Image (cartoon, rainbow, N blue to C red):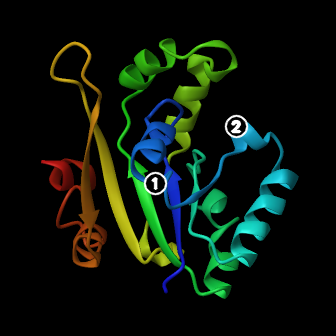
């Protein structure tokens, strides 16, 4: 059976944890720095999950390639298939979602802006086996949940982007 690890990439309040709860919580163990509080606890839990061969979701912002490399080599060494879910994010929408949070879950707007400025596009060269892009679709009426539109990036599209043949976000999400 294939062991799978999923690494989320997105700015605060982009829907990562909601997406985890709706799509993966039944079958994947979750690593989340907001709940674990320290990198040491994160490392302990990650090693525990990997040692048990569990499927894992790393539900952190992970805006930079360097952040993602904290996990990928260890997962690859244990033959995990690694998927990336990149959350398309607009500062304004994330700020609105952030305002709906309560207590310590709410972050300062400057945190949203600074993460957006640091955000680096994912690449297969990082070690991802599959890359998906997630876009939140606003609810269609009252009492409706947000929906998620998911598209998979194939290597051929990344290669075309690198060659300058397509504009990454505009062409991919249109």
Place residue 151 in its image quadrant: bottom left
Q: Position of residue 34 (x, y in %)?
A: 70, 37
Task: State how far apart marks 1 and 2 are (Cα).
Answer: 18 Å
Q: Which x, y percent locates residue 166?
A: 18, 61
Horizontal and vertical percent for residue 48?
78, 68
Residue lying at 26% horizontally and 16% vertically, measured from the top left: 143
Of the pair 29 and 62, the residue shown nearer to us: 29
Relative to 174, say whether 104 is above or below: above
Taking the view exactly as shown, the residue that stands out farthest to the left is 174
Q: Is residue 105 left or right of residue 2?
A: right
Q: What residue appears at the point 40 percent right and 43 percent down from the top-left corner?
A: 22
Q: Is residue 135 left or right of residue 108?
A: left
Residue 122 visible? The answer is: no
Dot 1 surroundings within 10 Å: few (below 14), some, or many (20 or more)?
some
The reply, left or right, for residue 81 in relation to residue 155 is right
Compare marks 1 and 2 and give the one earlier in the sequence: 1
Up-down: is 133 above or below 73? Answer: above
Q: Is residue 36 visible?
A: yes
**x, y percentage for residue 122?**
44, 61
Residue labelled with disc 2:
34
Q: Classify mark 2: helix, strand or loop.
A: helix
In the picture of the structure, the residue carrying the numbered disc 1 is: 24
> Given this view, does label 1 or label 2 mark the residue nearer the observer?
1
Please state the total of marks drawn on the protein image.
Answer: 2
Residue, far front: 26
Could you say whether the residue bearing mark 1 is in a helix, strand or loop? loop
């Amino acid at each position: 059976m294939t062991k799978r690890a999923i690494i989320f990439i997105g700015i605060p309040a982009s829907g990562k944890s909601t997406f985890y709860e709706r799509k993966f919580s039944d079958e994947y163990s979750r690593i989340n720095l907001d709940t674990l509080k320290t990198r040491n606890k994160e490392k302990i839990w990650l090693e525990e999950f990997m040692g048990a061969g569990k499927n894992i979701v790393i539900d952190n912002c992970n805006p930079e390639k360097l952040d993602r490399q904290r996990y990928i080599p260890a997962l690859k060494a244990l033959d995990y298939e690694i998927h990336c879910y990149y959350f398309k994010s607009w500062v304004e929408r994330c700020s609105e979602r952030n305002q709906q949070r309560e207590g310590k879950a709410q972050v300062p707007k400057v945190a949203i802006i600074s993460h957006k400025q640091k955000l680096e596009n994912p690449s297969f060269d990082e070690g991802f086996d599959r890359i998906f892009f997630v876009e939140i679709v606003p609810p269609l009426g009252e009492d409706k949940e947000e929906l998620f539109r998911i598209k998979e990036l194939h290597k051929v599209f990344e290669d075309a982007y690198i060659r300058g043949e397509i504009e990454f976000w505009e062409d991919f999400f249109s």
